């Protein structure tokens, strides 16, 4: 059996009795960082006779086959990442897919989640949300990703490194507009937990000084009047096809539709390129 073990995202006392039992009783523990796993075991007061192997981004593809073979031999393999649920922006997906394909039973010892914790603390709507994980480190690709999300009506959750938080928030201001509501959640469940809420422009200014620790960003979805980014981009592309210049067409449609200008420009530019290259 393969067990995905949700580990504490900060406070060791959030470890469930089930997690303690799974780690203590495992035959093999596949750990994202073996040193961090041993430190967690020590903090929880758990001892295990399991064979501990590393299972991280660098060796995930190669080690998956080995772990599946171990599972097929009858072992109980527990996957434990540094914090939270394996396979959610962490190693685990490849192994789950391979184990299911091999007919191995897969289960979970659920635990804390930075995504759900940040959502609950953000004071933003949580009835519908989407998880976007880490945005691209490259500014251009990140801007394109955010442009595609400008009309997303659901609350959005992102992970980000502390040293990139300020530039990501600045890019969100450009893509979503300065008044879009958001929350920066850092060091969740840890000693210096902090949740800063406000318009994206204020959050970007706050983050410009220095941000430390693990960061989860929560951003409210688009209001109804700006949700139709695709429709607005199509309108711009039609104007351009009729002879209008791109920037004035974007300005005109953005003013009328309420879609953020930068997001509309990126979407319309991409759509115009697609139409030019279409057979």
Image (spheres, rainbow, N blue to C red):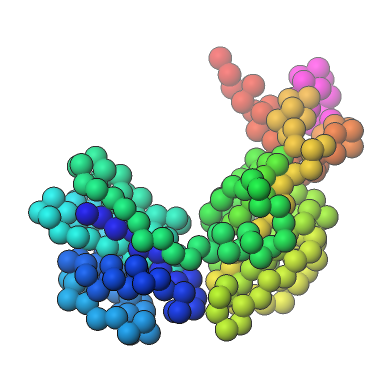
Instruction: Name above or below for residue 12 compared with residue 149.
Output: below
* Residue 68 showing in the rendered view: yes
Q: For residue 201, which quarter of the picture?
A: bottom right
Q: Residue at x 45, y 72 (%)?
A: 8
Start and end of the magenta stretch?
A: 236-249
* Residue 57 showing in the rendered view: no
Instruction: Name above or below for residue 50 compared with residue 175.
Output: below
| Relative side of 185 to 3, left or right | right
Please check the rendered image and state whether residue 274 is part of the magenta-colored stretch, yes or no.
Answer: no
Q: Residue at x 31, y 53 (%)?
A: 107
Pick out the residue farthest to the left: 73
The quarter in which the N terminus is drawn is bottom left
Pick out the residue farthest to the top: 279
State the residue in front, 96 or 13.
13
Instruction: Name above or below for residue 19 compared with residue 191.
Output: above
Q: Residue at x 68, y 27 (%)?
A: 272
């Amino acid at each position: 059996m393969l067990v995905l073990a949700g580990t504490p995202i900060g406070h060791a006392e959030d470890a469930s009795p089930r997690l303690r039992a799974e780690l203590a009783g495992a035959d093999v523990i596949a750990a994202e960082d073996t040193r961090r796993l041993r430190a967690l075991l020590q903090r929880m007061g758990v001892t295990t006779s399991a064979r501990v192997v590393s299972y991280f981004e660098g060796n995930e593809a190669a080690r998956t086959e080995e772990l599946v073979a171990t599972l097929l031999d009858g072992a109980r393999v527990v996957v434990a990442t540094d914090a939270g649920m394996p396979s959610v922006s962490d190693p685990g997906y490849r192994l789950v897919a391979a184990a299911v394909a091999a007919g191995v039973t897969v289960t979970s010892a659920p635990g804390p989640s930075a995504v759900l914790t940040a959502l609950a603390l953000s004071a933003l709507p949580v009835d519908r949300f989407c998880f976007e994980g880490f945005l691209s480190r490259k500014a251009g690709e990140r801007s394109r990703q955010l442009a595609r999300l400008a009309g997303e009506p659901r609350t959005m959750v992102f992970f980000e490194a502390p040293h990139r938080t300020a530039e990501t928030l600045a890019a969100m201001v450009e893509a979503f507009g300065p008044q879009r509501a958001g929350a920066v959640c850092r060091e969740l469940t840890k000693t210096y937990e902090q949740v800063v809420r406000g318009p994206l422009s204020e959050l970007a200014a706050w983050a410009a000084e220095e941000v430390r620790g693990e960061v989860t960003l929560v951003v409210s979805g688009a209001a109804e009047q700006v949700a139709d980014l695709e429709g607005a981009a199509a309108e711009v592309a039609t104007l351009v096809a009729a002879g209008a210049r791109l920037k004035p067409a974007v300005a005109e449609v953005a003013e009328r539709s309420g879609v953020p200008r930068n997001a509309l420009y990126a979407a319309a530019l991409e759509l115009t390129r697609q139409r030019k290259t279409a057979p």
